[in-house]
Every structure is written in C-alpha cells, then in structure tokens.
Image (cartoon, helix red, strand yellow):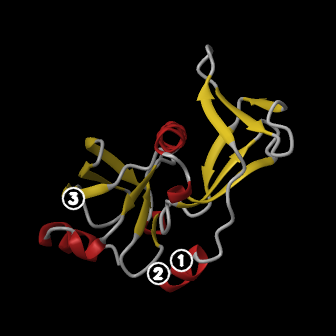
Amino acid sequence: MNREILSSYTHQLQPLPPFELHKNDMGKWVLTTVDQGDSNHQQEYREVVVVRAFPIEAPNFGISILSSDARELIWIETLDLVDAAQRSCIEQALREREFMPEILKLDRVSGFTTPCTWHVQTSRGPTELELKGEEDIRRLSTKTLIVSDRYGVQFLIKDLPQLDRHSRKLLDRFF
C-alpha cells in the first residue's frame, strides 16, 4: 500500500466505539464492548481473534477484532486511535497469532539449484530452511520478498536493498 493512499485514508478516520481487550483466566482473548447509548450495557465476546488487514505493507492500519465465528466486532483503522493500554494488548494478541520471522542475513546456501538449504540469521535467531523450488521465493514489491520453506513456514525479507552485499549476491542467484 503506498504512502499517499495511507495518508489520504487517515484523514477519514472514524472514532472507535468503547471497548476493552483482555485475557481471561484460560489465556484466551476477550472483548468487552459498551453500548454507547447505555453505558451500563456491556457485551462480552470470548475467544476473539485479532488480525491485520495489511500485515506487511501497513501493519499499523486496518486491524480487525473477530468473534470466534469470524464475525468482525471492531474495526480499528489505525493503532494511533487506541490508548496505550489497549494498543499493548492488541499488539500482544497479534504477536501471539502471527509468526513470520524476518531474514536479516543469508550466511550460506548449500547450492544454487533447488532443493537447497539456506543458513540464515532471522529476527528470531539463526536457523536453516530448506527451499523446495524457486517458486518458494515470492516478490511482493521491488524490495519485499516472502520465502517459504518446505514445512510452509514463511520468512520475510522486508527490505532487500538493506541486506548486506553477500546476502544480496546469494539471493541474485535465485532470480
């Protein structure tokens, strides 16, 4: 999503209805909403899920809180509209749900034909991933890639030009 679209989008923001997101005793996320006409009337939704609409290009825009049957309960246009305590809960719920380590550096590859094993440094530490085929590397934009390993785990290369020279040279062999 380009920056001009995002900036024009933020000029049309609607206020959020009052809500509270918290974990229950079982470790499940619970959403409590307050009826704006009657502040004594609250609705509680158990086992809600928090998801991003644009997890890579605009992670702070378009957050949805869904019921256990996948109905949208709250739409948060931007995390800037949420107070610090609720923002912390939302970000924690997103971290628990999302797992896409970022590749920070390629140390070495076992070969330049697939299948091959990549030895990489990620945002979650060093790891090895096995690439089944060149189609497991998908370009999302001129500088963003997603690499899927043979187990279906997806790794993000957020900013290709920012990788070190050695890593870019290894990646060039696969394009």
For residue 173, say whether it is visible.
Answer: no
| Mark nearer the viewer, 3 or 1 | 1
**Residue underneath mark 3:** 106
> Amino acid type of disc 2?
Arg
| Front residue of 132 and 21 | 21
- The residue positioned 50% from the left and 58% from the top of the image is 80
Question: Label 2's element?
Answer: helix
Tell me the quarter of the image containing the C terminus: bottom left
Residue 153 coordinates in the image, percent (x, y) = 47, 47
> Amino acid type of disc 3?
Leu
| Front residue of 110 and 70 | 70
Q: Is residue 69 left or right of residue 13?
A: right
What crowding class fits label 1: few (fewer than 14 Cα within 10 Å), some (14-19), or many (20 or more)? Answer: few
**Residue underneath mark 2:** 3
Q: Decide which of tag 2 and tag 3 comes sooner along the chain.
A: 2
| 108 shown above or below 42 | below
| 41 shown above or below 173 | above
Question: Label 3's element?
Answer: strand
- The residue positioned 33% from the left and 66% from the top of the image is 113
The CA distance from mark 3 to mark 1 is 32 Å
**Residue underneath mark 1:** 6
When asked about the image quadrant of residue 131, the answer is: bottom left
> Amino acid type of disc 1?
Leu
For residue 144, say whether it is visible.
Answer: yes
The CA distance from mark 2 to mark 3 is 29 Å
Question: Mark 2 touching mark 1, by CB under 8 A?
Answer: yes
The CA distance from mark 2 to mark 1 is 5 Å
Question: Label 1's element?
Answer: helix
| Mark nearer the viewer, 2 or 3 | 2
